[in-house]
Image: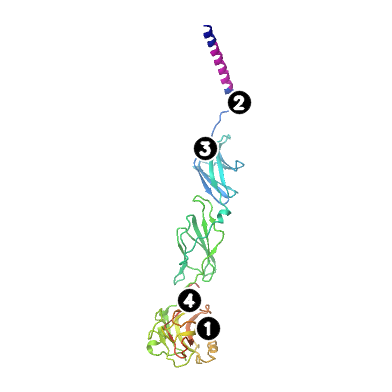
Amino acid sequence: MKKLILILIGCAMLATWYGCQKDNHATDYKNFYNGHEIVYTGAVGLAIVQPGNLEIGLKWKASSDPSIVKYVVYYNNKADSQIVAVSGKTDTIRTVIKGLLEYTYTFTIYSYDAKGNKSIPYEVNNAKVYGPIYQSTLLNRAYNATTPYTVDAKGNVTLNFITPDTINVGTKIKYTNRAGLVVTKVLSADSSSITIPDYKGGTALTYNSGYIPQRTAIDTFYAARYDTFPTILGYAMCDKSLFKKLKLPNDMNPYEGDTDIDRLWDGYTTPQGYPQIFHSDGAHSLPQTLTFDMGKLYNKLTQVEEIGRNCCHNPDDFEVWGIADITNAATTLQPNDAGWKAEAISKGWKLLKEVKRTDDGQAPLKTDLDNVNAPIRYIRIRVIHNSDNEGSYTNMTQVSLFYDVLN
């Protein structure tokens, strides 16, 4: 009985002690929080990283808590921060943090109410900022090495590029137009070509490609420098349908009517045999001349192509002369006269090129002309020497002239 009484007394004392201790703990808790209950504001929703050039954009779903008056973004281990004030009701909050290094950051976002209560933290990890190191790795989009460009008869230039990297967003094309102005056009990433209708021939055309490191990026990064596009030559063949025979004094006569100089523009592209050729009558020793009208004035002839006969009497040394107006342009001296060249110049003829071949004179040979800026309509060819050393006859399959459609 005594033992039972002692046990009951002990239990009562233990209960009293525990109750005191509980009251003390409750008092300590209130003291720790200064007598106030903790209040958490509504946390932010899903955040999206928008990388930039030494800056970064952050976008997140706004909290539904109406008491929120601002958001604070902490970074650099909370040594730096950016405040984003709330102005009116919005579903999405955006901010751009500038002045960053090219580095991978962690950002912590809190929402605050007017009393200073804040939300639980929302962390954004592995947020990469890009800069000059990334830019140094970028290369301009490659052009099509097989066919870098095409030029049509109207002078429209089409530039051809290969498929770009998936992060390419466009390529700036910079060129000079025919009015002398510098123009910039943009080739979109989903296109492989771009047409330039007013490119001025002989001027530099450069290009610079832009990229984004991620699809959400707020900045475009361009390759460090412009590259120069391959030289564009806009040469088109003069319209042979307009060519006409023209005989000046002392020009060569044909061997027969079916081998006159109109054979030189009947369209053959390989050496032909008799009678599909021009064949002179050989009445005089070389040098000798022939003349024709191209039918229109060309402001910039650029090239001449000559094709010989498939056997013999092919020129391996000949001159190409040109003039804009045939009035009073006839020479009086024989072409093999030592004074002929000076007389031709005095009549207004311009020596466009002396062509010297080292082969048998048969294959097509295209040669650049020299006086490319002289307006020319009439052509005179003075044959000086044949490849087989025959000194009178001249045989040729075809003569073609080319002009610059870009000027």
Residue 28 seen anywhere in this rendered image of the structure: yes
Gap between marks 4 and 1, in whole Å? Answer: 16 Å
Q: Which mark is residue 43?
A: 3
- Please, which residue is most extreme toward the top here? 1
Name the amino acid type tagged 1.
Answer: Lys
Tell me which segment is drawn in magenta: 9-24
Residue 157 seen anywhere in this rendered image of the structure: no
Name the amino acid type tagged 4.
Answer: Tyr
Q: Nearer the viewer, residue 9 or 26?
A: 9
> Looking at the picture, how far across and down is residue 207, in whole percent?
52, 63
> Looking at the picture, how far across and down is residue 15, in whole percent?
54, 16
Residues tagged 3 and 2 counted as in contact (Cβ below 8 A): no
Q: Is residue 288 left or right of residue 85?
A: left
Residues tagged 2 and 4 counted as in contact (Cβ below 8 A): no
**Earlier-in-chain disc, 1 versus 3:** 3
- Residue 20: in magenta span: yes
Q: Which mark is residue 378?
A: none
- Residue 98: in magenta span: no
Q: Residue at x 52, y 37 (%)?
A: 43
Name the amino acid type tagged 3.
Answer: Ala
SS at badge 1: strand
Name the amino acid type tagged 2.
Answer: Asn
**Earlier-in-chain disc, 2 versus 1:** 2
In the image, residue 322 sits, relative to residue 51, either above or below, namely below
- Please, which residue is most extreme toward the bottom here? 283
> Looking at the picture, how far across and down is residue 288, in whole percent?
48, 89
Residue receiving disc 1: 350
Residue receiving disc 2: 31
Residue receiving disc 4: 403
